[in-house]
Image (spheres, rainbow, N blue to C red):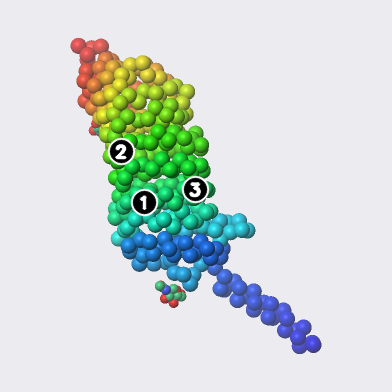
């Protein structure tokens, strides 16, 4: 009995010691989520790239995987598989349908895999907690799927530099978290007019540069819109800038390489935060309105244009 009492603290100590030695710092992985991750791995053409995704280890410690930090943890909340250039990181194949089977996922980042192609899987609509969708610099193609608007939790979309084509779906103005929505569709092959619904929406960030968009997007601009970042450069947009009131919170306004006519409105000098600005290679005319904002930018932000000038003297 005495011997037993004496032994107890020692075995407790060794148990604790054993626990600290062997327990991983991260939460244990949810077995269902682990099975899904293994299917995602197997869904690519080169699953061998996922070197740390070993089924006998805690999936919350796998490269690119983050789990819920709460007591009910072990659920996968973030999958970040960006390729920074190491050849070993580059995935190929289609996006596996099983990406839709991680119900706690809020961030999905899979970028710069030029051999990842095909359409976006419809199963993504099952991700009811997905907020951050970052899939640029892949080779994803097809039409932009309007089903993305079924993911009510989305606040940020970056699908830049893929091979999406066709029209921008009008439904893209219907994301409920609209106020903070950043829509990055740059460097695709999108064509046609920007839908009226999308023009009317109040974007924080809108990047539609390097597409083949046509028409008149002036409804995007109103002094009271919350837009801070607007890049419409390198499209085929055609409109008269003369009467426009730009959103006064703009920090970035890049409109170069379109077919913009008219003159630069004096209101632009109210954009006190404007730091990045370019209207070159358009059809603008008239005097650049001198003022605290326009005076920040040298000629490389304005020229060439049709008949734009710095002052009356330089116009003559
Ligand atoms: C997974 O990890 C176990 C134990 O560390 C190791 O024996 C096994 O070879 C690993 N499997 C792969 C596919 O790397
Ligand atoms: C994308 O990957 C290429 C190599 O595949 C690399 O050179 C480049 O730096 C990567 N870009 C980014 C933004 O990480
Ligand atoms: C979207 O991704 C592209 C490509 O990596 C990048 O250049 C751009 O800055 C991103 N936009 C945002 C808002 O993160
Ligand atoms: C403005 O855009 C043109 C392309 O039309 C580019 O050559 C020029 O460098 C840009 N200016 C600035 C200051 O970025």
Q: Between residues 270 and 262, which one lies in front from this camera angle?
A: 262
Indicate if the residue with disc 1 has its beta carbon within 8 Å of ligand 3.
yes
Residue at image point 22% right, 14% down: 315
N-terminal label among 3 and 2: 3
Disc 1 to disc 3, how far (Cα)? 17 Å
Query: Residue 188 lies in what quarter of the image?
Result: top left
Label 2 element class: strand
Neighbor class of circle 3 (other Cα within 10 Å; few <14, some 14-19, many 20+) is many
Residue 111 has which mark? 1
Residue at image point 59% right, 71% down: 20
Disc 3 to disc 2, how far (Cα)? 25 Å
Location of residue 91 in the rendering, given as x and y in whole percent from the top left corner:
33, 59
Label 1 element class: loop
What residue is pinned by disc 3?
Answer: 130
What residue is pinned by disc 2?
Answer: 166
Q: Between residues 270 and 254, which one lies in front from this camera angle?
A: 254
Q: Nearer the viewer, mark 2 or mark 1?
A: 2
Q: Between residues 258 and 190, which one lies in front from this camera angle?
A: 190
Relative horizontal placement of residue 42, taking residue 299 as reference (left or right)? right
Disc 2 to disc 1, how far (Cα)? 22 Å
Q: Nearer the viewer, mark 1 or mark 3?
A: 3
N-terminal label among 1 and 3: 1
The quadrant the N terminus occupies is bottom right
Residue at image point 52% right, 48% down: 128
N-terminal label among 2 and 1: 1
The quadrant the C terminus occupies is top left
Query: Residue 47 lies in what quarter of the image?
Result: bottom left
Label 3 element class: loop
Location of residue 204 in the rendering, given as x and y in whole percent from the top left corner:
45, 33
């Amino acid at each position: 009995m005495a011997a037993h009492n004496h032994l107890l603290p020692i075995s407790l100590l060794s148990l604790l010691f054993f626990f600290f030695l062997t327990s991983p710092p991260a939460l244990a992985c949810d077995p269902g989520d682990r099975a899904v991750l293994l299917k995602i791995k197997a869904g690519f053409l080169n699953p061998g790239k996922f070197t740390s995704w070993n089924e006998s280890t805690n999936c919350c410690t796998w490269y690119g995987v983050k789990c819920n930090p709460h007591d009910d943890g072990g659920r996968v909340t973030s999958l970040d598989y960006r390729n920074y250039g190491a050849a070993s990181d580059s995935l190929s194949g289609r996006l596996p349908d099983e990406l839709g089977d991680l119900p706690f996922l809020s961030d999905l980042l899979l970028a710069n895999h030029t051999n990842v192609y095909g359409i976006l899987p419809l199963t993504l609509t099952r991700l009811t907690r997905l907020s951050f969708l970052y899939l640029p610099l892949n080779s994803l193609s097809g039409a932009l799927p309007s089903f993305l608007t079924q993911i009510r939790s989305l606040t940020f979309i970056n699908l830049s530099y893929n091979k999406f084509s066709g029209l921008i779906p009008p439904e893209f103005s219907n994301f409920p978290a609209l106020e903070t929505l950043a829509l990055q569709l740059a460097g695709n092959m999108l064509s046609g007019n920007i839908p009226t619904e999308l023009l009317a929406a109040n974007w924080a960030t809108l990047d539609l540069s390097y597409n083949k968009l046509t028409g008149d997007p002036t409804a995007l601009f109103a002094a009271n819109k919350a837009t801070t970042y607007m890049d419409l450069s390198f499209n085929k947009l055609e409109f008269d800038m003369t009467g426009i009131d730009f959103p006064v919170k703009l920090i970035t306004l890049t409109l170069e390489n379109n077919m913009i006519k008219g003159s630069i409105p004096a209101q632009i000098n109210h954009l006190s935060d404007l730091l990045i600005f370019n209207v070159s290679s358009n059809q603008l005319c008239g005097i650049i309105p001198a003022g605290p904002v326009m005076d920040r930018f040298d000629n490389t932000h304005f020229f060439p244009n049709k008949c734009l000038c710095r002052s009356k003297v330089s116009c003559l």
